[in-house]
């Protein structure tokens, strides 16, 4: 038997998790399809990555991550008012609606949330939907393994399926 693996840089971690907000609402969960990531390469939010160090297979933990170590504080300058006419007439715009838009000039895709709907204007919020939120994770560790040399060189996990670059 080799020494039991524990989470540290260079370990490929399988992570089962449930993510709740302050009010208990579940906003994300792995649901039996574990997230697999390479530890130490910033693939997951910093506050969660830090808290997982030292865990072994079978361990469970509750991790509370403040906004500053998750998706950041709400940036009050990341709101913009646009004309209602920017959207199709038959589109039902309601507060909280998440939009995938494309910049008219650069053609870059970006996400926004409808913050407020007025008669002829719409206020868009370009913050991450979880900005300003404290995140409550319940995690368990179903599997750990050492990363391959290639994975370490690339800084990400290679799955069973074909990996293209
Ligand atoms: Zn790769």
Image (tube, rainbow, N blue to C red):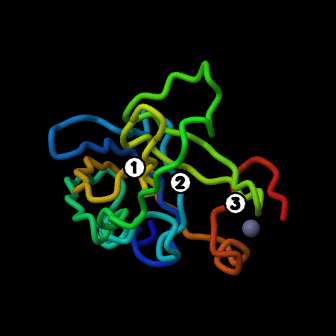
Q: Position of residue 160 (x, y in %)?
A: 72, 49
Q: Looking at the rendering, in which quadrant would you find the N terminus?
A: bottom left
Q: Secondary structure at mark 1?
A: loop
Q: Ligand 1 quadrant?
A: bottom right
Q: Looking at the rendering, in which quadrant would you find the C terminus?
A: bottom right
Q: CA distance from mark 2 to mark 3?
A: 10 Å
128 relative to 50, above or below: above
In the picture of the structure, the residue carrying the numbered disc 1 is 129
Contact flag, marks 3 and 1 (Cβ < 8 Å): no
Q: Nearer the viewer, residue 64 or 107?
A: 107
**Tag on residue 36?**
2
Q: Nearer the viewer, residue 7 or 102?
A: 102
In the picture of the structure, the residue carrying the numbered disc 3 is 158
Quick one: label 2 or label 1, which is nearer the N terminus?
2
- In the image, what residue occupies the spot 48% across and 70% down? 39
Q: Quadrant of residue 103?
A: bottom right
158 relative to 91, above or below: below
Q: Secondary structure at mark 2?
A: strand
Q: Position of residue 84 (x, y in %)?
A: 54, 36
Residue 6 visible, this orientation: no
Contact flag, marks 2 and 1 (Cβ < 8 Å): no
Whether the residue under disc 3 has CB within 8 Å of ligand 1: yes
In the image, taking residue 75 as reference, residue 60 lies left or right, namely left
Contact flag, marks 2 and 3 (Cβ < 8 Å): no
Q: Nearer the viewer, residue 118 or 138?
A: 118
- In the image, what residue occupies the spot 46% across and 48% down? 124
Say few, some or many: other residues with alpha carbon within 10 Å of mark 2 (under 14 / 14 to 19 / 20 or more). Answer: some
Q: Secondary structure at mark 3?
A: loop
- In the image, what residue occupies the spot 55% across and 49% down? 111
């Amino acid at each position: 038997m080799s020494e039991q693996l524990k989470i540290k840089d260079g370990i490929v971690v399988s992570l089962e998790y449930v993510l709740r907000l302050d009010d208990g609402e579940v906003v994300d969960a792995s649901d039996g399809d574990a997230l697999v990531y390479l530890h130490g390469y910033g693939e997951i939010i910093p506050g969660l990555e830090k808290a997982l160090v030292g865990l072994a297979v079978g361990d469970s933990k509750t991790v509370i991550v403040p906004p500053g170590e998750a998706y950041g504080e709400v940036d009050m300058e990341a709101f913009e008012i646009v004309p209602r006419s920017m959207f199709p007439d038959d589109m039902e715009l309601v507060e909280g609606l998440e939009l995938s838009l494309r910049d008219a000039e650069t053609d870059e895709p970006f996400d926004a949330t409808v913050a407020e709907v007025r008669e002829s204007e719409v206020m868009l919020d370009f913050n991450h939907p979880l900005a300003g939120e404290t995140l409550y994770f319940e995690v368990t560790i179903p599997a750990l393994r050492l990363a391959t040399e290639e994975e370490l060189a690339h800084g990400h996990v290679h799955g069973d399926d074909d990996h293209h670059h």
